[in-house]
Image (tube, grey):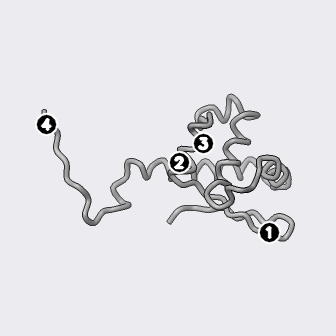
Amino acid sequence: MAKTIVISYKDNDYTLEFTRDSVRTMETSGFDITKVDSMPATMIPKFIFGAFRAHHSSVKMDKVDTIYKSVKNKEQFIKCLGEMYQETVETLTSDEENSEGNSEWKASW
């Protein structure tokens, strides 16, 4: 099961999660996880906005920024987002998702 974070903000709960689709969208819009440390002012907002996409795609960036400003322990929050992101990316090479009935393949060389 995918990891999620729930943020309660002004009597609303926001579930943050990464899916393959949200990660793909983030990457095509310029997000690069390897640049979070070297370009934090650019990448962290994209990172957080991407986490909202799976369940709250209609929430605009300025609202996400406002919600993020209210988050306590931001460093740990970003680390948790990193774990969630990495877990989603790992599903691209993992056999666990469809262990039953996986397609067989063989190379021709």
Question: Crowding near pointer 1: few (<14 within 10 Å), some, many (20+)?
Answer: few
Q: Which residue is mark 3?
A: 26
Mark 4 and mark 1: Cα distance apart in space: 55 Å
Q: Which residue is mark 1?
A: 12
Identify the mark nearer the N-term, 3 or 1.
1
Q: Residue furthest top?
A: 38
Q: Which residue is mark 4?
A: 108
| Of labels 4 and 2, the one closer to you | 4
Mark 2 and mark 3: Cα distance apart in space: 13 Å
Q: Residue at x 19, y 48 (%)?
A: 105
Identify the mark nearer the N-term, 4 or 2.
2
Secondary structure of the residue carrying tag 2 is: helix
Secondary structure of the residue carrying tag 3 is: helix
Q: State which quadrant residue 106 falls in.
A: top left
| Of labels 2 and 3, the one closer to you | 3
| Of labels 2 and 1, the one closer to you | 1
Would you say 33 lies left or right of 87 here?
A: right
Identify the mark nearer the N-term, 4 or 1.
1
Mark 3 and mark 4: Cα distance apart in space: 35 Å
Secondary structure of the residue carrying tag 1 is: strand
Q: Quadrant of the C terminus?
A: top left
**Label 4 close to label 1 by CB (< 8 Å):** no
The percent coordinates of residue 76 (x first, y second) are: 71, 51
Secondary structure of the residue carrying tag 4 is: loop
Callout 2, which amino acid?
Gln
Callout 3, which amino acid?
Met
The percent coordinates of residue 36 (x first, y second) are: 66, 35
**Label 3 close to label 1 by CB (< 8 Å):** no
